[in-house]
Amino acid sequence: SYTQVMYYTFRSLDTKGKVLRVFVSVGKIVLLLGFLYMFICSLDILSSAFQLVGGKTAGDIFQDNSVLSNPLAGLVIGVLVTLLVQSSSTSSSIVVSMVSSGLLTVQVAVPIIMGTNIGTSVTNTLVATTQAGDRSTFRRAFAGATVHDFFNWLSVLVLLPLEVATGYLYEVTKLIIDSFKIESGEAPALLNVITDPLTESIIQLDQSVISGIATGDPEARNKSLILKWCQTFTNTTLMNVTVPGPENCTSPTLCWVDGNYTFTLKNISETYNVQKCTHLFVNVNLPDLAVGLILLTLSLLVLCSCLVLIVKLLNSMLKGQVAAVIKKILNTDFPFPFGWVTGYIAILVGAAMTFIVQSSSVFTSAITPLVGIGVISIERAYPLSLGSNIGTTTTAILAAMASPGDTLANALQIALVHFLFNITGIVLWYPIPFTRIPIRLAKGLGSITAKYRWFAAVYIICCFFVIPLFVFSLSLAGWQVLVGVGVPILVLLIIILIINMLQKRKPSCLPAALRSWDFLPLWARSLAPWDKVVGVITAKCCCCCKCCQAASDDQEHGVQESAEKNKKAHTAVYDNPAMSADKEVEDEIKIELKILKMTRL
């Protein structure tokens, strides 16, 4: 077996070889943990940078209550604000504060919470684009990342109309809140205990500023998001104060009139700054935007560098027999008849890991490179992503339970809405195998982006910016315009989808003209002409030799891919050949056994 081969191989080494092998293995593990730590910290700094750049804008967006009352506009605002601050927790906390202050009702806040669920999934999609160097790796990584996007979008397409029609999420969560006597508690710190020392030494933000702008506090607009004083002291003193008249006194017994002046006793609170923060930007006299752009650049640089190094380390550690064994352990189902349990255990693992790291973006971004190198299959990454959606909502529930008693019910109901939304989505798109549509859609998109890598940028821009802004503009124009423009587009998309399905499965049901899209011009039915346009633009813009080298590599890779398809037609597209070559593993084991026998002789 593999274990025996490794054992005998290790025994055949001399003392120096054994020490060197152990030292190298331990060093790689330590480096991997170090890069993973820096990767998680860079995501935290990236979130802070986005808040500095767009946090006040996010607060202004939330302030327009007349727009938020439109469910579609609320959904889009949830998406856009989460994109601006790169944190569903931050955008959710803004919604909670607005509901607690009475500016929003829970019913109006439900679509916004759905939008935050979509907005947070862009992070791992961006992480996947950093693996565009190798087509096969990019195909798997992008499919593994976008399976999360498709799940969120499909869930919204079903549950938003259902919520508007029946109030399903609101009514069920209200019933839960009314049925249980819930006591307030505290949210656990967990991974923040490890990451905060580094991230807080770089930047600390005053989260109350964004919430203050959203709730209409005029003083919050002039405040900086950069936290200057980490420890303050508020002193409340009962003092004599002058008021305009007796009707303004706190109590008739605590009211005195002396000539033209009226005095009363009143509690006056004064805040004193005790200890200044120690982060890098505490004494920097730069606007929030400048600091945000600096942190954005540095955090993206560290994030991409750590990701590349993590992938390199994983490739060096997980190759040959090791990769085959690990892949088999991670992707093997339980024996019949308990195979169906495996996916649900993966959901629980995803929820638990996300609860530990307290961020679905961090967890899904961490497994994206593993999907890219083929260690985790997309079929296994899908339930892990679903579990991460649940894990991030449990953290929100615990955080809501730390709210004051008078706002606890509303805060907790919004957190439960987020939880129930994801649970309902899992029920819709996971239990029955043929309903796992996000996997098929993600694989299709992965194949397209691997062939036309520029399409990844088009997908991100369209799905997370252009389409939400288009829907938002229509919703601002009124329901008549939204229905008049949106319904024909939606009907056209449904007709195209039905025709595509019939072309593949029952072309005889269609007229001869519709059995293929050949009657359309090439640019309307293929990305190849657009690829040529992008190639021409890229060639003109990039005159350096690296761009030319990349283009020639792409051509060579295309020739190699066609040759490999002819040679190895049995290899699955979404399997890493280096990690699924069981025959090669067996051959290596046999060779090592022969060497060991010869060594013994």
Image (tube, rainbow, N blue to C red):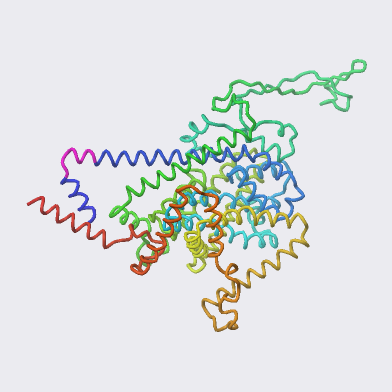
Report whether 159 appears left or right of 194. Answer: right
Overall secondary structure of the magenta section: helix
User: In which quadrant of the rendered view does residue 140 lie?
Assistant: bottom left
- Farthest right residue? 259
- Residue 16 is a magenta residue: yes
Q: Mark yes or no: residue 345 visible.
A: no
Along the viewing direction, whichever of 535 and 384 lies nearer the viewer: 535
420 sits left or right of 56 in the view: left
State which quadrant residue 163 falls in: bottom right
The residue drawn where x is 58% and y is 55% is 420
Q: How far across and how far down the image is residue 138, in percent?
A: 45, 55
* In-image side of 196 versus 174 (left or right): left
Whether residue 504 is situated above or below residue 37 in the rendered picture: below
Q: Which residues are magenta?
A: 13-20
Comparing 534 with 185, the one in front is 534
189 in relation to 153, above or below: above
**Residue shown at the point (75%, 46%) measured from the top left:** 64
Tell me if I can see residue 58 in this picture: yes
**Residue placed furthest toward the left:** 601
Residue 216 belongs to the span the image colors magenta: no
Q: What quarter of the picture does the N terminus occupy?
A: bottom left
Examine the image and state in which quarter residue 36 appears: top left
Q: Position of residue 173 (x, y in %)?
A: 63, 53
Of the pair 54 and 384, the residue shown nearer to us:
54
Residue 383, given in percent of the width and then of the height, sits at 47, 57
x and y, in percent, of residue 389 in the image: 53, 52
Q: How many marks?
A: 0
